[in-house]
Amino acid sequence: MDKIRFGVFGLWRGEAFVQVINTFKDSAVLVSVCDRLEDRCKQAISICEKAGVTGVKCFSDFDSFIDSGLDVVVLCNNFHMHAPYAIRALKKGIHVISECTTGSTIKECVELCRVVEETGCKYMIAENYPFTNSKLEMARLCREGYLGIIQYAEGEYNHPSDESELRYLTPYQYHWRAWMPRTYYVTHSMGPLMYMTNSMPVTVNARAVHSPQLQQFEDFRPNYDSMGMMFCMMDNGALFRFSGSSDLPTPSGYRVVGERGSAECGRLVPPGQVYAHYNHWQIPEGMSRTQTYNPVKTEVMRKAENFGHGGGDYYIIYNMIEALLHDTPYFFDVYKGAAMSATAIYGWRSVINDGKTYHIPDFSNEEERKKVEDDDLTPFPKEDGSGITLPCSTMDAKKQGYNIGI
């Protein structure tokens, strides 16, 4: 294969990937971008020209965009609308990087898995949080056995916002952020734990917490919950606890605990560093019982850290290029993406059904997919406000008669 031809759809978030793609001059080329706003397209072209990249085409229509000679499309459109666009690209023989979530309904997850199998194209969920230096080091400790058999892990992604930021992030009445339940944005908290421990969720149950402080913004955001917390039994026998996107005034953080020791980053650990702790009778050779340290950086780490999300954005493009040029395996395939989406979706069902435990389907298994293939319940409205079939907050759920155990 000559240079891999990339296209980026949605330039509010996608601008970061435009910058990354332009650095892979020997192996990749940005062919086209697509956004309904002309100013964003102009900005992307300006970024390319400053990087010495010319000839990039601009589109406002998705179908014309994917007919512009692409090998890979990076989907950076609205959170809950990735699956339909991914399917359209896959059916054209185009590989897909989906920036946020695999599917907003179980039905979409099933359909997407089937199309990936039918087309043979590569599909990657662009979960970037595992690929910071500290989390990569935690993954190494897990995978090389330093911590022993993993028994417990926790992850929190916290993003508190004041009114001005909330209004900026919610530009119109039926924007997805205004209607997203607190369990739905789960990839940044769950994804790193899955990556570190090489595990998949089997069951989920969850709770959420109402926030009177957020309720004051009811004129433009009907979701008044501050956080949702999920508990998963994993296929390696471990218990995971993690949030969705929480509005809590505390740093994000991650912790993994095995039979021999534990490791964590974020929260009270200095940025970029890892804290490791071992049983006093099981201290690995050359290490101390407790230590806080900066991970040794690989060449890829050093290149990546100049880009967004602690270098994670770089790894997304790097992993797809390596997969296409060298058939290198990557972690976040369509089945793991669907499992994360299903955890988010069933996590919310658990919240509004008094903490009921739900089974996470094995999306690589057609028999399990058939059982849930018609499940299209959603809290997200269409552009005209119609189509909502689930409440988006605990308060809304209580008003509709759901049992949330309070």
Image (tube, helix red, strand yellow):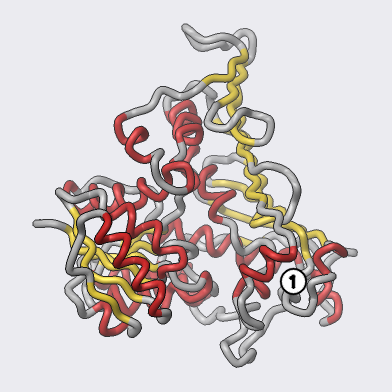
For label 1, count other residues whose C-alpha is less than 10 Å away and answer few (under 14), some (14-19) or many (20+): many
Position in image of residue 24 (x %, y %):
22, 49
For label 1, the SS is loop
Name the one closer to the observer, 44 or 224: 44
Question: Which residue occupies 36% across, 40% down?
Answer: 304
Position in image of residue 348 (x %, y %):
68, 66
Q: Point out the image quarter for the C terminus.
A: bottom right
Q: Which residue is mark 1?
A: 223
Image side of residue 369 versus residue 268, left or right = left
Question: Which residue occupies 54% across, 55% down?
Answer: 187
Question: Which residue occupies 73% across, 74% down?
Answer: 221
Q: Is residue 91 above or below residue 134?
A: below
Name the one closer to the observer, 53 or 75: 53
Name the one closer to the observer, 384 or 13: 13
Q: Residue furthest left?
A: 2
Image side of residue 159 versus residue 315, left or right = right
Position in image of residue 393 (x %, y %):
76, 71
Q: Is residue 85 above or below residue 55?
A: below
The amino acid marked with disc number 1 is Asn
Residue 95 seen in the figure: yes
Which quarter of the figure has residue 376?
bottom right
